[in-house]
Image: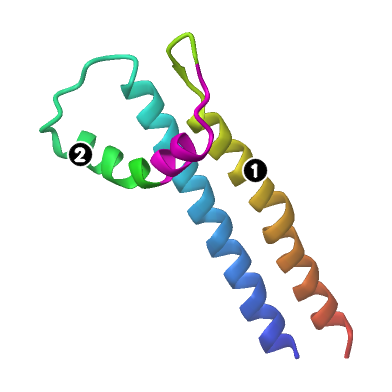
Amino acid sequence: MFVVANLIQAVAVVIDYVLWFYMLIVIARAVLSWVSPDPYNPIVRFLYNATEPVLWRIRRALPLYGAGIDFSPIIVFVVILFLQQFLVRSLYDLAQTLRYSS
């Protein structure tokens, strides 16, 4: 059973790293929104292409524009933190349970 436990723990680590990386991308996107970057810059295009599908869905579902402030990145942060606390920790706990249940 330790092989399955190691696999689940590895999946949890990968999910955790992907969520942290996406959070950093959203932070970079939010910082770029404060300045007027060149829209043809490849880094700016990557940031917009990586974040806009998620942010657009949140903006469409919850039109929360207060005084010109876009709250969709904050909602993405909350969802990422929830997934890290619930999903990743649950996978860690499941791996520990499988490891010591034999």
Which of the 4 image quadrants contains residue 95?
bottom right
Q: Position of residue 27 (x, y in %)?
A: 44, 31
Furthest-right residue in this view? 101
| Label 2 Cα neighbours within 10 Å, binned few <14 / some 14-19 / many ≥20 | few
- Which of the image's four quarters has the N terminus? bottom right
Furthest-top residue in this view? 67
Furthest-left residue in this view? 40
Judged from the image, the secondary structure of the residue bearing numbered disc 2 is helix
Q: Is residue 74 above or below residue 69?
A: below
Q: How many marks?
A: 2
Q: Most prominent secondary structure in the magenta stretch?
A: helix
- Which of the image's four quarters has the C terminus? bottom right
| Amino acid, disc 2 | Arg
User: Quick check: is 64 in the magenta stretch?
Assistant: yes
- 42 sits left or right of 55 in the view: left
At 53% from the left and 34% from the top, the residue drawn is 62
Q: Position of residue 76 (x, y in %)?
A: 54, 39
| Label 1 Cα neighbours within 10 Å, binned few <14 / some 14-19 / many ≥20 | some
Judged from the image, the secondary structure of the residue bearing numbered disc 1 is helix
Q: Which mark is residue 36?
A: none
Q: Position of residue 21 (x, y in %)?
A: 45, 47
- 41 sits left or right of 102 in the view: left
**Residue to which mark 1 is pinned:** 81
**Residue to which mark 2 is pinned:** 45
| Amino acid, disc 1 | Leu
Which of the 4 image quadrants contains residue 77?
top right
